[in-house]
Structure formats: C-alpha cells, structure tokens
Amino acid sequence: MAGRTKREVAKAYDALGGRIYNLRYTEEQESKYEMLLERIPPETSDIALDVGCGTGLLTDKLSSRNVGLDISLALLSAARMGVGARPNNELVQADAENLPFRDATFHKIYSVTLIQNTPNPEKAIVEMKRVSRRGSKLAITALKKGFTEDQFTSLLEIIGLEPVEFIFDEDLKDWIALVLYI
C-alpha cells in the first residue's frame, strides 16, 4: 500500500472487512505474535499499545491493560465484537502518524505489519517513541516487500531506536525488530 494516502488505506481495509481480514491474515500474524509475546510479554501492571490492531488478534492475547488503535472503522468494529467487550481493552480509531495519547504513556508497544501502510513510516515510529515511557519495549515489524533489511534498520536508527534483537525468519513475510527505549 506504499504511496497511498491514509484515506485510501482506511478505505481498502474497510472494504476488506473483519471476516475476510481474519481469513487472510490470522495464520501469518499468529506466528509473529507468538515470537513477540515470548520475547516481550506484557505484565499485568503494563499499559500496552497495539498500533494497527486490525481485528484485535494481538490485543486479545495481551494480559495487561491495552489500547488497540487502527485507522479502519470496519476492522475496529470486528475487534469490538471480541476484545472490545473486555474491561482491560480500549479501542481507538486514529492513524499511527498522529497518536492521540500523551507523551510517555505506554510500557509496551506492538506494531505488527503496519509501517509499510503509512504514508510516512518515519513519522509513525517517531510517534510510537513519543508515547513510550523510558525503559519501554517496542516490537515493530515491517513487510519485507516494503523494506529491505537495511532500510528497516536504518529507519529505526534515524529515529534513535536501536534494536536489541532483530529476528530473521525466512518463513515470515516481515522483518521483526525488538527495541528497548532508553
């Protein structure tokens, strides 16, 4: 979706809808979630942000207080049917380049297969950094077809985020970076 406006991205995912989204992406996303949660598990006292939460597949697995954010109203509607009903989950429609949260709010941030869908990936990651508390852990992934490994790591480094672990799995469609924000 590179080169698309935010409105076009939202419209594409709204047209896809929650049921088709889940059929198309659940298996691939579940593999990434398992790796991420094994390495960056949320603690019950954490406040976690799932940027680009889609239908809430990851948000549903988090044991902390969670905020799922997505630009697509249709995907958030599907998420509300599941995770939105739980008291520790909030769902917000917004875009990743303009997060509607105060600075230093979140302990954990998960952004899975999102940044290649944003018009300005650098701005989206700067926003994630802004809303992270010092000592926060961030898990950021990007589609390999959208970024080379060097482009992805350079993007993180430009913003001042250095991965503590970079996961390479040839079976996954994403590059995965785990970051400690110091």
Image (spheres, rainbow, N blue to C red):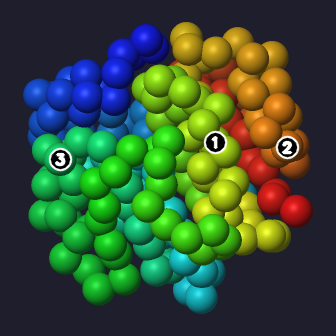
Q: Secondary structure at mark 3?
A: helix
Q: Residue at x 44, y 72 (%)?
A: 66
Q: Which of pointers 1 and 2 lies earlier in the amino acid sequence?
A: 1
**Nearer the observer, 54 or 117:** 117
- Kindly indicate the quadrant of the structure image that contains residue 77: bottom left
Side of 68 relative to 140 (left or right): left
Q: Amino acid at mark 2?
A: Gly
Q: Position of residue 42 (x, y in %)?
A: 60, 72
Q: Which residue is mark 1?
A: 125
Q: Residue at x 67, y 64 (%)?
A: 132
Q: Which of pointers 3 and 2 lies earlier in the amino acid sequence?
A: 3
Q: Residues within 10 Å of mark 3 (few under 14, many from 20)?
A: many
Q: Residue at x 55, y 77 (%)?
A: 47
**Nearer the observer, 35 or 93:** 93
Q: Which mark is residue 73?
A: 3
Q: Which mark is residue 160?
A: 2
Q: Position of residue 128 (x, y in %)?
A: 61, 52
